[in-house]
Amino acid sequence: NAGVTQTPKFQVLKTGQSMTLQCAQDMNHEYMSWYRQDPGMGLRLIHYSVGAGITDQGEVPNGYNVSRSTTEDFPLRLLSAAPSQTSVYFCASRPGLDGRGTQYFGPGTRLTVL
Amino acid sequence: AQKVTQAQTEISVVEKEDVTLDCVYETRDTTYYLFWYKQPPSGELVFLIRRNSFDEQNEISGRYSWNFQKSTSSFNFTITASQVVDSAVYFCALSEVLYNNNDMRFGAGTRLTVKP
């Protein structure tokens, strides 16, 4: 049971480049989310999904796109990277569609935008 | 909106000391869940505990214990006889069930350093 997996682990981009962070889970969880972690700010929600074909914005969605074509996969796209997007990105999933479930996190992707 | 405050940015203790990490939350929901996560130097987020708003019993798991007090909106975490392996950043988080159940809110984290 792999849980939540993320690729890549590290990435360096130049300003204006685009890329996709991959996330997959094998726990059949309906809910998936993307967070970014910045020093002194904890984790902040970027986008989330409550099932295949359904996505919504979180607290800091600007500059990011998501889609959910299957229950397992939830990629995060940066369309035109900016230095302000330098951060550590975590994907998570949880059982259930309300706040009761425990979120389980992937290992994270450390992104640097030059 | 819900909010979590971890006022202690960094704590440093010597091994075998007890240490308490504070967590204060704000929510308008009557049903909510509180969580603690550990982030060791390797960077992953490790789930430690989940507590619902109707259960104010203290919980103990080995050297770890949690004190949930609704009257003061606090969910504090105590490590007894700390060890070097406890060095990590610890996050407290809040998840509402009714009002905003899709956005788990995290505190800024407390960095704990346990010195040998």
Image (tube, coloured by chain):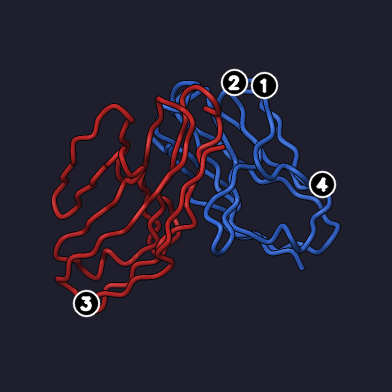
Chain colours: A blue, B red
Q: Which residue is mark 3?
A: B14
Badge 4 element: loop
**Mark in the foreground, 3 or 2:** 3
Residue type at mark 3 is Val
Are discs 4 and 3 located on one and the same chain? no
Chain label for disc 2: A
CA distance separating discs 1 and 2: 5 Å
The x and y percentages for residue A65 are: 75, 38
Distance CA(mark 4)–CA(mark 3): 47 Å
Looking at the picture, does residue A54 appear above or below residue B24? above
Disc 2 marks which amino acid? Gly
Looking at the rendered structure, the secondary structure element under dot 2 is strand
SS class, disc 3: strand
Q: CA distance from mark 3 to mark 2?
A: 46 Å
Q: Amino acid type of disc 4?
A: Leu
Residue at point 44% right, 58% down? Answer: B109
Specify the subunit that label 4 lies on: A
Tell whether label 2 touches label 1 (CB within 8 Å).
yes
Q: Earlier in the sequence, mark 1 or mark 4?
A: 1
Q: Quadrant of the N terminus of chain B?
A: top right
Q: Secondary structure at mark 1?
A: strand
Mark 1, mark 3: which one is toward the viewer? 3
